[in-house]
Image: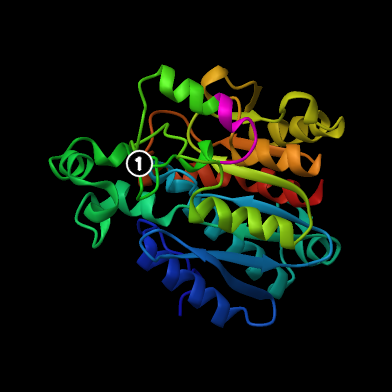
Amino acid sequence: MDRRTVGTELPDSMHVSKWVTALSNQYAGLLETSVIGSSMLGHNIYALHIGNRQRKVLYCGGVHGREWITSLLLLSFAEDLLSACRNGDRICEMDIGRLLKSGGLTVIPALNPDGIEISLHGAGIPGLSELLGGQLTEQIGSGSNYRRWKANARGVDINRNFDAGWDEMRSIALERGITGPSSEGWTGENPVSEPETRAVTALCEKETYRHLIAFHSAGEEIYWSYRHFTPPKAHIMANILAMSSGYSLSEPDRTASSAGLKDWFMEKYHSPAFTVEIGSGASPLPLECFPFLYNRLREMLVLGIAI
């Protein structure tokens, strides 16, 4: 087997499952994997646990379908961490073995595997039409820009489904004319109504995480605050992430100001949480830009564990 287990193929469910299995086999004893839930279409939602389980942070990618490049980012980083730990190597001048003894990492590479499948492959996914209904399925199948799909297979935007200001986000959706399942922006009928949302919230309730970083694309921005729930140290930590990546610190506009994973984590645990919008341009970002993105963000990814 080549040193690289995680390839640069498109990270659909088949490839994510293959890579997680291969990493688990190759790095037995260093990596613990688990299935924390399954999507509406029955795809596994994986979590990868590396390093000190008593003092860990959480990285989550693939929240929105068209932002699948974040899944590739986190799986590639997980492999680099494991390889460096086994071989006594450094990443960005940091001793990874020592780092992972003092702090651990959980990676959810693809929280929304169905949305990624739709963005990558369109409407021809078994069981999709029964979930979405005829009109939306026909729109995807007729080429209605399915590559831009953000929601899950039930047409719920996962990052509008968390129980933190959900009522406000629902009102905004209705103001924008989003009254039901859609490619993006629909909050669902109730907060935490979706299996993907429940999977990550249940994991956080079971485990203890010092902080959380949710990866999205694009914008080269870092969102770090949420109302009065923002802890004082969050700004200092955000500045470290910004300086290492070259990204700017930002505040979300009204249409994206709550009901996200970051917002829920900060409100629930009063701990720092960040949304990092990787890359620039319209999503989905082209696969060709991944090497540049990854090289630019490696230091930030390591520092996210250390801070």
Q: Three-letter amino acid code at disc 1?
A: Pro
Q: Position of residue 301 (x, y in %)?
A: 66, 48
The magenta span reads 162-168
Which is nearer the eye, 19 or 44?
44
Badge 1 density bin: few <14, some 14–19, many ≥20, Cα 10 Å = few
Q: Position of residue 158 (x, y in %)?
A: 49, 43
Give the side of residue 160 with respect to residue 120, left or right.
Answer: right
Q: Secondary structure at mark 1?
A: loop
Q: Is residue 161 visible?
A: yes
Going 23% across and 36% down the picture, which residue do you hit?
A: 145
- The residue carrying mark 1 is 286
- Residue 165 sits inside the magenta stretch: yes
Going 80% across and 33% down the picture, which residue do you hit?
A: 234
- Residue 289 sits inside the magenta stretch: no
Q: Is residue 111 visible?
A: no
* Quadrant location, the N terminus: bottom left
Going 79% across and 44% down the picture, which residue do you hit?
A: 269
Q: Position of residue 151 (x, y in %)?
A: 39, 42
Give the side of residue 100 with respect to residue 140, left or right.
Answer: right
The quadrant in which residue 47 appears is bottom right
Which is nearer the eye, 45 or 249?
45
